[in-house]
Amino acid sequence: MKYLLEIIRYLLAGLLALVILSVYISNIALSTVLSEGYVLSKLSDTNYYKKIYEDCNENFKKYIMQSGLDESIIDGICSINKIEEDTIIILDNIYNGKNNNIDTESIKEKLNNNISLLINVEELTEESKRSIEEFNQLICDEYVNTLFHTKYENKVYDYIIKISKVLNIINKYGRWIALAIIFMILTINKKNPSRSISILGMSFLLIGLVIFYGKYILLKNMQIDNIFFLSTGFSDMIKNVLNENLNKIQKLAKVLSVLGVFFIVFGNAFQKKNSKIKKNKMLYLPGY
C-alpha cells in the first residue's frame, strides 16, 4: 500500500505539471496569435506597414521592367496608410469570418493617371490599351498578394475558431482539474502535510524542466531568425512574437524551477524534522 501511494503521488505530480503547463500555454496562445488586437499591435511595433510598402514597390518594379515603362508610373499609387487600412480588413476577415474585399480601384486610377502623363492613351491602339489594362490588373493583383494570400483567409478563420474552442475548454476546465489534483494531493498526504509541499515542488520543477527541454528542441530544429513566411514584414512580426513569448515562458520556467527546488528541500527538511520529533517522543513513552 505504501508503494502504491508513492506511485500515485508521482503520477499526480506529473499530471498537475501537465495541466498547469497546458493552461499556461493556452492562455498565451489565446492572448497573442489568436487575438486580433495583439497581432495589430505587433504589426505596428515591427514596422510591418512600412516593410510591406517597400515590398510592394519592389514587386511592382518587376512588372515595369517587363513592360518597358518608366518606374515613375508607380509613384504614389499606394501608401502606407492604405496598406494599414487594407491589412485591418484582411485581419477582420481572418479573425471575424468576414468576406470584405481589398479595394484596388484607387491604385488602378492613380496608375492610369501616371501612365497618361507619360503617353497619350487616346492615340494607342485597342491592343495597346488592352495591354495597359492587363498591366494595371497585374499591379493590383500583386498588391493584394503582397499584403496576404487572401484566398486562404476563410480557411485560416476556420482553423482559428477550432483551435480557440479547444484552448478555451482547456483554459476553462484546466483550472478546476488543477485544483482537484491539488486537493487529492493534500488528501493523500493529510497525515504528512510536508509531503504535499514536496509533491507540489516536484510539479513546479517538472514544468520548468519540460519548458527548458522544449525550448532546446525547438531552437535546435528551427532557426527563428531564418523564418520567412508570406513576406519580410510578416516574417519579422512572427519572429518578434516567437522571441517575446519564448522569453516569457523561459522566465516562468526559471521561477518555477527555483520554487520547485525550494519546496522539495523545505518539504523534505520539514518531514525529517517531524520524523525526528516523533522518534524522540517514542523514546520517552513507557516501555521504551
Image: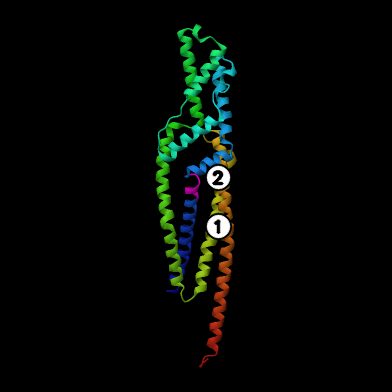
Between the C-alphas of marks 1 and 2, the distance is 20 Å
Identity of the amino acid at label 1? Leu
Answer whether residue 227 is visible to the viewer in this image: no
Q: Please provide the residue range marked out in magenta.
A: 28-33
Main SS of residues in magenta: helix
Q: Disc 2 marks which residue? A: 242
Mark on residue 264? none
What residue lies at 58% left-to-right and 65% top-to-bottom?
261
Q: Secondary structure under badge 2?
A: helix
What residue lies at 45% left-to-right and 37% top-to-bottom?
92
| Residue 1 part of the magenta segment | no
Specify which label sits upstream in the sequence, 1 or 2: 1
Task: Quarter of the image for the N terminus: give it.
Answer: bottom left
Identity of the amino acid at label 2? Leu
Crowd tier of the residue under label 1, counting other residues whose Cα lies within 10 Å: few below 14, some 14–19, many 20 or above: some
Question: In x, y percent, where is residue 98?
Answer: 40, 36
What residue lies at 49% left-to-right and 14% top-to-bottom?
132
Q: Disc 1 marks which residue? A: 209
Query: Closer to the camera, 91 or 181?
Result: 91
Q: Is residue 22 above or below residue 57?
A: below
Question: In x, y percent, where is residue 46?
Answer: 58, 39
Position of residue 6 in the picture relative to residue 74 (left or right): left
